Image: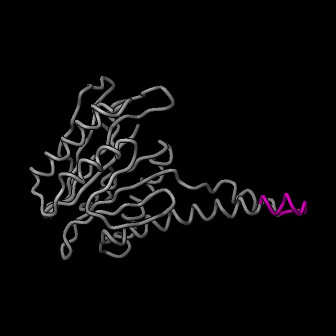
């Protein structure tokens, strides 16, 4: 029952995510940080299969760092969003190519290139949805919605997961452009309370991160269950 949501305010962007790591009916931990700091002024909140989420977000983070290392300047938030969208689209198309090849082999029943088939078999789409927030000096804060089929939209507020039914409803009612940090955090708390009270299997803990002219950083945790296995992980 994952939930990731975010919004843009006056000079900042917030990203909020639940911190539950679950599989089937089991909760493995309650302090999983699902919001990655891409660089000094970018945040990437992700929901989806645990393996895809961890592998893909780390892949994007390292490539963003590699670009800055090679060129001496960081990617803009829009450029990082388009790069992320492109990698999701490439993985999706490779998977579609594999399906098409399997159909052709079944129909034609011909000898095939085993190397090509194996290469396609291990190229699967990523089951991950992303909210990418950032702050650019000349543009200000921005938020991008990227889903698992590589749709990309610039938005002012958005959400993924089962909790999005409630967080989107609350943001539609209370969000307005130019919100202060205090107003935005108050709205985030309203969303969290609505999720906890309305969702049948609601995640107990949430992490809030902010990005503004001073950089990307953790803002607060909203915890109803303390995880005894250790401190929150980045």
Residue at (50% x, 44% y) in the render: 51
Examine the residues drawn in magenta and state their main secondary structure: helix
Query: Which x, y percent locates residue 41?
Result: 24, 62
Front in this rendered view, residue 50 or 183: 183
Q: Quadrant of the N terminus?
A: top left
Q: Quadrant of residue 82?
A: bottom left
Residue at (28% x, 48% y) in the render: 169
Query: Which x, y percent locates residue 101?
Result: 76, 62
Span highlighted in magenta in the image: 102-112
Apparent side of residue 129 relative to residue 102 in the rendered image (left or right): left
Q: From what the image shows, is residue 183 above or below residue 135?
A: above
- Check if residue 215 falls in the magenta segment: no
Query: Which x, y percent locates residue 91?
Result: 57, 61
Query: Which x, y percent locates residue 186?
Result: 13, 45
Residue at (37% x, 61% y) in the render: 145
Q: Quadrant of the C terminus?
A: top left
- Check if residue 103 falls in the magenta segment: yes
Front in this rendered view, residue 174 or 110: 174
Front in this rendered view, residue 158 or 69: 158
């Amino acid at each position: 029952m994952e939930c990731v949501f975010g919004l843009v305010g006056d000079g900042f962007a917030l990203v909020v995510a639940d911190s539950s790591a679950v599989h089937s009916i089991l909760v493995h931990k309650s302090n999983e940080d699902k919001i990655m700091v891409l660089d000094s002024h970018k945040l990437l909140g992700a929901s989806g299969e645990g393996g895809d989420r961890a592998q893909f977000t780390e892949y994007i983070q390292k490539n963003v760092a590699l670009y800055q290392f090679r060129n001496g300047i960081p990617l803009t938030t829009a450029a990082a969003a388009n790069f992320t969208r492109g990698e999701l689209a490439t993985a999706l198309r490779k998977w579609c190519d594999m399906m098409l090849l399997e159909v052709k082999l079944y129909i034609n029943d011909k000898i095939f290139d085993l190397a090509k088939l194996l290469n396609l078999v291990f190229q699967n789409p990523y089951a991950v949805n992303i909210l990418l927030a950032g702050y650019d000096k000349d543009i200000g804060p921005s938020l991008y919605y990227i889903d698992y089929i590589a749709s990309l939209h610039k938005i002012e507020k958005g959400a993924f997961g089962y909790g999005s039914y409630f967080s989107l409803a609350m943001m539609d009612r209370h969000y307005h452009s130019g919100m202060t940090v205090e107003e935005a955090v108050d709205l985030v708390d309203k969303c969290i309370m609505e999720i906890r009270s309305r969702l049948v299997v609601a995640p107990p803990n949430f992490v809030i991160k902010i990005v503004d002219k001073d950089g990307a950083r953790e803002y607060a945790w909203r915890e109803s269950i303390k995880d005894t296995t250790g401190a929150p992980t980045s």
